Amino acid sequence: MMNEGYKSGFFSIVGCPNVGKSTLINRLVGQKIAIVTDRAQTTRNRITGILTRKNYQMIFLDTPGMTKPRNKLGSFMQKTAEEASKDTEAILFVVDALQGVRERDEAVMKIIKTERAPVIVLINKCDAASAVQMQEARDAVAAAGFDTVLAISAHTGENLDKLEALLCGYLTEGPQYYPEDMVTDQPERVICAEMIREKALELLREEIPHGIGVGIDKMQMRPDGKLTDVWATIYCERESHKGIIIGRGGKMLKRIGSEARKDIEWLLDVQVNLQLWIKVKEDWRNRQQMLNELGYRDD
Ligand SMILES: Nc1nc2c(ncn2[C@@H]2O[C@H](COP(=O)(O)OP(=O)(O)OP(=O)(O)O)[C@@H](O)[C@H]2O)c(=O)[nH]1
Ligand SMILES: [Mg+2]
């Protein structure tokens, strides 16, 4: 659709792991489209979020936190994050005021400085950071040579109205790319798989969560339309991990399933019967075929 005077544009959201990028995209579009946990490296794929107003549309790209890759999945994530900033109106670079601006942020700043697009630095978590922490972050960002800076809270929404107003200045005359009621281009089954992964990330400890992948095998609504069956498989890397994911008497798996089911029911707006299977796929994070199957594909 092309209306006279209508504006649109793309913005990538990049930064280190755990700084609040996915929380921000959810807030901006007003719906949970990206999973959020207190663990680093939650997001693995590029996630599109769409904000539509009467006179403009903003398309945000959430990306995996940038960090040194340790396996093929990690390399895919890094590449995804780096490529998201090509051809965007501006790059939203998020730093975490609580953790401070450190070497790892500086490494990302170096990368984004080589991009054509202007960079807007968002100092996040202003709801929880002290005045001193906020000032330290501001100083570090200024020292790195960035001058468009805004303090925000992705969690409470503080200053996100200012951010939207600022971003309006970067839009150009262009089409409404997506229908007005669309908040993401991710298929429902992908969001469902992510919700299961989110619960596994939250409930499991140590290295196990990072070795987990989730695939939806089948989703089918019953003929009466009142219940949807969802069959999903959780992949893990070792037999011993499988035991931990199942838990004593099946308790852990049950908990992951029942918490994920609630979120999926909310998303699909229908009652859900969720069946979870677990499969061991040794070293799947280095196996291209498994990466492709789980949607971590380069194309
Ligand atoms: N207090 C506070 N916490 C926040 C804010 N934004 C995010 N968080 C928390 O920070 C943690 C990480 O948030 P995410 O949105 O998953 O971070 P991310 O940058 O997407 O992380 P990766 O996907 O791992 O790169 C979660 O525990 C969030 O609840 C904020 O504005 N204030
Ligand atoms: Mg994320």
Image (spheres, helix red, strand yellow):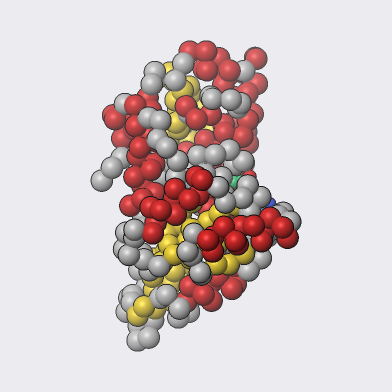
- Looking at the picture, does residue 218 appear above or below residue 235? below
Where residue 188 appears, x then y in whole percent?
44, 47
State whether residue 111 appears in this view: yes
Quarter occupied by residue 246: top right
Q: Can residue 50 be seen in the rendering of this structure?
A: no
Counting from the top left corner in percent of width and height, residue 248 is at: 65, 14
The quadrant of the rendering that contains the N terminus is bottom left
Q: Closest to the observer: 239 or 13? A: 13
**Res 4 quadrant in image:** bottom left
Quadrant of residue 152 in the image? bottom right
Q: Nearer the viewer, residue 299 or 250?
A: 299
Find the residue positioned furthest to the front: 143
Residue 210, position in %: x, y?
50, 30
Residue in the picture at 38% in, 21% down: 283
Tag count: 0
Q: Residue at x 63, y 54 (%)?
A: 97
In this rendering, is residue 161 above or below 41?
Answer: below
The image shows residue 84, relative to residue 280, as above or below, that is: below
Q: Residue furthest bottom?
A: 4
Describe residue 203's horizontal placement relative to residue 299 as left or right. right
- Looking at this view, is 164 or 197 the one in front? 164
Q: Position of residue 158 (x, y in %)?
A: 66, 65
On screen, residue 223 above or below 56: above
Residue at 54 percent of width and 39 percent of height: 40
